[in-house]
Image (cartoon, rainbow, N blue to C red):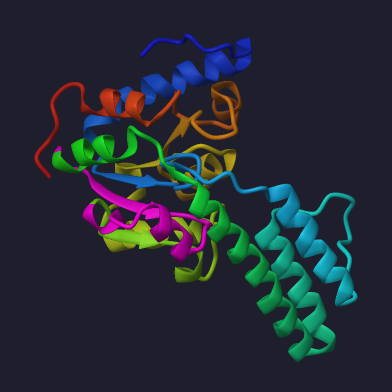
Amino acid sequence: MGLKYDFTPAVRRAYRWSQMAFSNHKDDIEALIFDFDGTLARLEIDFGLMRTRVLALAEDFGWRPSGLEPGYVLETVEEAASALAADDPARGRAFAVKAHRIIEDMEMDAAERGGLFPEARPSLQALRASGFKMALITRNFGAAVSRVFPDWPDFFPVFLPREAVARVKPDPFHLRAALDLLKVGPVAALMIGDHPIDIETGRKTGTWTAGLASGRVSTAELAAAGADLVFEDLAGLTAYLLAGPRPPF
């Protein structure tokens, strides 16, 4: 595919090594596990506003983050709910319910305005027809995904939104759950996403990783995060995966 991206020399060397390593195992890949937002679709969720609203709610409940920079929104909700529950379990549960309602409402609103990337369905159809097992895992709420992508069952026998698992990515539990359902080991799987979280999840789980710069993160940042492959979009990755012989699974 060629190194046409603007990487630093150190990232370029590491990326070239990982690309070569993947090429030697390309025909061993049985399963493709996809992220959703930024990878298959654009939802335009304002995560900054979401965080602001959740933190305002937490302050109303009497909690403030201990660090200067709060983490990802879902983890912030979990941290605040746990701290509040330590003093009053009912208060912790009430906060969690209201915080998740804020998140879900914003996701559903973004889903109304969002849509799949034009290359998503044709690419998924071609990959599925070639024999790959496929799963969709996401930190998004399942109803929001279904609003944008109602025909996801036509492509994915395994779909694990955040409410379907005990721990979401980058915790490897999320990806392992999908691999278990597909009955595929990590070394025969490729985690595909648009964010360093997806690359981190794959590396923690032991899968190969592919970064797509179709979201908010550049190819250089995805390579620096340790992606074995990077592409501008799903169409490029699909062409690469379908090039050459495919083993009969």
Q: Which residue is at 58% across, 11% downward?
A: 6
Q: Which residue is at 53% across, 46% downward?
A: 43
From the top left corner, tell me how far across and down residue 65 is, in percent. 86, 62
Q: Quadrant of residue 128?
A: top left
- Front residue of 116/112: it is 112
Q: Quadrant of residue 147?
A: bottom left
Q: Is residue 141 visible?
A: yes
Total marks drawn? 0
Q: Which residues are magenta?
A: 130-154
Q: Which quadrant of the rendered structure holds the N terminus?
A: top left
Is residue 135 found left or right of 210 in the rendered image? Answer: left
Is 232 situated above or below 95?
above
Is 92 situated above or below 206?
below
Q: Which residue is at 49% across, 70% downward?
A: 163
Is 118 situated above or below 150?
above
Q: Which residue is at 30% across, 63% downward?
A: 181
Is residue 197 found left or right of 3 in the rendered image? Answer: right
Q: Is residue 131 visible?
A: no
From the top left corner, tell me how far across and down residue 211 is, in percent. 47, 32
